[in-house]
Image (cartoon, coloured by chain):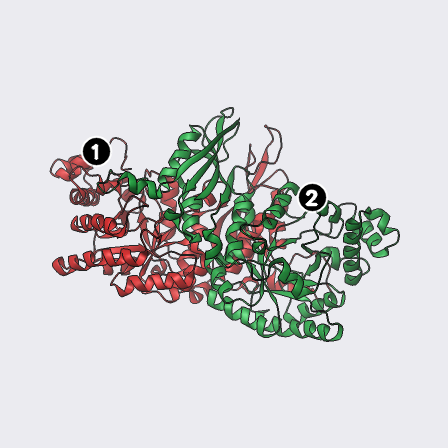
Chain colours: A green, B red
Amino acid sequence: MIRLTYHIETAGDPERLAAKIASDQSTGTFVALPGETPELKARVAARVVGYRELPPVGEAAWPDGRAAGATYRAAEADIDFPLEAIGTDLAALMTIAVGGASAIKGFSGFRVTGLRLPPAFAGAYPGPQFGVAGTRRLTGVHGRPVIGSIVKPALGLRPHETAALVRELVEADVDFIKDDEKLMSPRYSPLADRVAAIMPIVRDHEQKTGKKVMYAFNISSDDPDEMVRNHDIVADAGGNAAVICINAVGFGGLKFLRKRARLALHAHRAGWDAMTRHPSLGLDFSVYQQFWRLLGIDQFQINGIRVKYWEPDDSFVRSFQAVTTPLFSPADCPMPVVGSGQWGGQAPDTYAQTGRTTDLLYLCGGGVVSHPGGPAAGVKAVRQAWDATVAGVPLEAYAREHEELAQSLQTFGASDAAA
Amino acid sequence: MIRLTYHIETAGDPERLAAKIASDQSTGTFVALPGETPELKARVAARVVGYRELPPVGEAAWPDGRAAGATYRAAEADIDFPLEAIGTDLAALMTIAVGGASAIKGFSGFRVTGLRLPPAFAGAYPGPQFGVAGTRRLTGVHGRPVIGSIVKPALGLRPHETAALVRELVEADVDFIKDDEKLMSPRYSPLADRVAAIMPIVRDHEQKTGKKVMYAFNISSDDPDEMVRNHDIVADAGGNAAVICINAVGFGGLKFLRKRARLALHAHRAGWDAMTRHPSLGLDFSVYQQFWRLLGIDQFQINGIRVKYWEPDDSFVRSFQAVTTPLFSPADCPMPVVGSGQWGGQAPDTYAQTGRTTDLLYLCGGGVVSHPGGPAAGVKAVRQAWDATVAGVPLEAYAREHEELAQSLQTFGASDAAA
């Protein structure tokens, strides 16, 4: 059985709508069929197996023209779909149990809030190739978060300009660097030229210091063939990671790539916000992330505490829990990537609220680059913040003997404004 | 230039948010860069080129915790992105100009309402291989809508059971039949077995009558390699069409398939409703459809008048206009597929509201199968409805001399309930 949980809001009867989802999305039909025996139905029919009425809500999430003051009934329904009816293809699962149901009339709100897959999916999908352990092995970072940074501005730098910034970051002793998710392979910065400009810096640094910085090149393309060509350019130049804009390449793009992948795949979920910002519409991250993990994501960007883009802290914390909870085995967990406005000041809250783990990639843009002492001081400050956090020492106290952290607190501390 | 139009709602200043979209999604950066010359910015910076304030709205589309009675400013902004900044990759366009912008803080509502692409995209994408002319050529139907039907129940029939229903429909003289979008290749009905059971019926009918019914097999899969294998099974058996669940296979799946396609590609947009049902959130179909047309869709399902699933008639009419408006040339228009609860009774309104054209595939499920005289009478009734409509004769008048239409009016007419 594949179990879906739906949040339903309606001016009508939510229990009737739950039954309609189960019927429409499986054996529902407009005509009594001679061949439609009870046995046939039993084989593939979805069934409502749980139903919990919730307090009514005062507004329609999907406007429905009713006057202000109307109320809407809300409920949560669990529906079991036989594995036999769907199979293990994620395109079928998405079409039947997620996307298709959003077309039903009568909802004033509808959100997919839960998904529990049977073990057959474990056998059908590769999952992460590298995940947490592989990311640690490739970066050589153990016992603390992997510290990353991003090359900005997002668009416009030519490869040699990007490379100059990369050199600064590499020399700042950062563990991980990534292309912006918006930079793929435009004419002013073709991926091949960017790789040619950047990888010698990474390789030279490795030769000199023994430390190989992980650089995630954005290889995303609407064309799976092109994405694999991009992948090979990076891998052949000695690179070990790639940014994938998962929503834009789609299931097909990622599935095709993963079969042929030698690089750690770093997921950026641009566009996800539109699917989840309304709490009564769209789908929960806990559902969404399962698809991409099965398809093979190694590192998953999930925002952080007090981010500069939209997301409440409690939503981030739930996302962190989601990606660090095994679907079938610990090996199917990607490395959580915590970013957006991070500078180290959020380390104590991040650590406290995510189960006191350092198994994360902590991505600081301005928090590293805009440090008054320069990027090297920025990286030191972030490490100091995590050292203090793990040791249970308040940042302010630790900063008394750690100048870089003191400078970060002064520069970014008032507003968490490492924008 | 690539021009995007955004609908913005906010408790703050929509003009400031428009400027923020342009900045964040192009050259925005957290640090003043030595290399960031005005020349560099000019090359890739997005710019707000149009701004129209709209009447304020009384509710936050994305709940923001403000008290009832608060108002929100609304505006429409046009933003030009230089082609140089994005290139012609649709994954980049989606990430930069559609998805990414939905993460910005401060929106109470945000919807992408317009997209105008420069001619460079015409050269970069194949567009439909068959479209309207190819669908007419393959079905041999001219001067009237192509009349289609769907095999139901959606799930559970084994190949021989499906084939028995297909035989009935083929003998009913329908022009087009399709698998349900939810039926891909589950264990009880593997695609290869379905093709083996159905194609002999199609081929035999062609031998006997000279008429080849177009059967669109659902070849969707999360795996592009598998989808191409499925495609080849259908094509090698003499099939000429395939259903693709576009949201589930993603840009990557469709792009990969289209390069290798010999079949007409019939798009089902399951999941689209969640992106568009709220008028202040998500994106307009007019934007969405451009991506899939460029990628090569030949037939596009867009609901119809008085449908059984969610969609107001005016929204359907706008969708019809969208898919029948050339992006760059008439050849890039797919065949509109009008369906959901259709039985012929909606023909007059469909014809009147979509520019008096018969260039459409008119898809009737129950309207054909549940006709009291059987599927053959159902197909006749639908053709009669369209004949009457094009002749300008009211259906009731035409029905006086056309028994099948009279029966349809009696059976389905009261409620349009060809469910």
Left/right placement of residue B313 relative to residue A33 reads: right
Residue type (three-letter) at the residue carrying disc 2: Gln
Up the image or down, A234 lies above or below B98; here it is: below
Q: Which chain is home to disc 1?
A: B
Does residue B1 appear in the picture of this structure? no
Give the camera-side residue of B169 and A90.
Answer: A90
Up the image or down, B147 lies above or below B2; here it is: above
Foreground tag (2 vs 1):
2
Left/right placement of residue A284 relative to residue B122 reads: right
Up the image or down, A38 lies above or below A376; here it is: above
Name the residue located 45 percent from the left edge and 32 percent from the top edge: A64
> On the image, which quarter does residue A82 sit in?
top left
Percent position (x, y) of residue B286?
43, 50
> On the image, which quarter does residue B406 sit in?
top left
Residue type (three-letter) at the residue carrying disc 1: Thr
Q: Which residue is mark 2?
A: A353
Disc 2 element = helix
Percent position (x, y) of residue B275?
47, 45
Left/right placement of residue B340 relative to residue A258 reads: left
Give the camera-side residue of A96 and B1.
Answer: A96
Taking the view exactly as shown, the residue that stands out farthest to the right is A401
Percent position (x, y) of residue B405?
17, 38
In what quadrant of the picture does the C terminus of chain B appear? top left
Q: Which residue is mark 1?
A: B411
Percent position (x, y) of residue B163?
23, 51
Proximity of marks 2 and 1: CB atoms separated by less than 8 Å: no
